Amino acid sequence: MLKRTLSTILLWTLVLGCIKLLGATGGVWLVTVVSVLTQHEFYQMLRRMGLAPFSRTGLTLGALVAFAPALPLYFPHANLHLFISASPQNLLALAVVVFALRILAAREPHNRVETLAWTLFGLVYVPFMLQFLVRIILIDTPNEGTGLVLAIWLIAVSKGCDMGALLAGKFFGRHHMAPNISPKKTWEGAVGGVAFSALLGAVIAHGLPGNTYIHKLPTAFTPAMAALISLPVAGLTIVSDLVESIIKRRAGAKDSGATIPGIGGVFDLSDSLILAAPTGYLLFSLL
């Protein structure tokens, strides 16, 4: 628990420090790096299952998919067709073409279908989903920095659910949620995690008006609205964690890696954001 706490503090220090120094640019690069590392660990787990994904090609295309929404930030005067042709959807279509050509010769007949399916799934499930976090960072309003603040809020609420569920499950957990997937998860922990996320989301939204970030939040983003939005985000955070647990159990691994002391791999850190990012983007867009 101590290692997990220290790692969490260090990670938040690095994230906030990077964003403080580099702003939206730092946020975009952080998401892209986390996406690539997560996808890499995903492909490593596939290899433990006896599968053979196109890792290098998949990671290259994955980095482009995650970074694609930020192209206008770096090429503001470029032709519009550049952004359209390099959209995440078009890059996914390109990936299908590339992988379909590669399986004709690069894999044995008995595993070609699995190679195509799992490599593409890794591309969709990790970078395509996390690119919505980049889209949140780049939300454009009259008040510069709104998207960046919303992205930080989403990350805090998502990771807060993990923390709340861990503590509530430890002290009050009695009824197992999915014993065949993740034996330690309980319904009491899930309720505690969602409740803590709602409280944290409301506290952050209420606390921001007391500092220089007041003008960066949408006027509709009241503490009550923040708590309400936190509920589906937190719920899907739990689902994301269960999905990763399914993959890890299939791979025979306790953690996706050993990069972060007390937490595990990067996938163990980012899994909660995979479903939360597109959900948050949709809900923020409504504001």
Image (tube, rainbow, N blue to C red):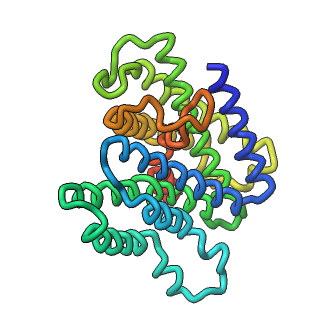
Q: Position of residue 204 (x, y in %)?
A: 67, 38
- Is 166 placed above or below 62 here? above
On the question of residue 228 being in view, the answer is: no
Relative to 143, 59 lies left or right: left
User: Residue drawn at (28%, 61%), measured in percent from left and top?
Assistant: 116
Q: In the image shown, does 81 or 55 lie closer to the viewer?
A: 55
Q: Is residue 167 visible?
A: yes
Residue at position x 65%, y 73% from top?
73
- Numbered label tally: 0
Q: Quadrant of residue 246?
A: top left
Relative to 142, say whether 121 is above or below: above
Residue depicted at x 60% and y 48%: 221
Tell me if 69 is positioned left or right of 124 in this view: right
Please give the name of the residue rendered at 60% of the width and 63% of the height, measured from the top-left corner. 139
Q: Residue furthest left?
A: 110
Write down the quadrant of residue 99 in the picture: bottom left
Q: Residue 112 location in percent, x, y?
A: 23, 60
Q: Quadrant of the N terminus?
A: top right
Does residue 274 appear to the left or right of 17 in the view shown?
A: left
Q: Position of residue 273 (x, y in %)?
A: 50, 45
Instruction: Give residue 55's position: percent from left, percent from top.
Output: 43, 58
In-front residue for pair 251/167: 251
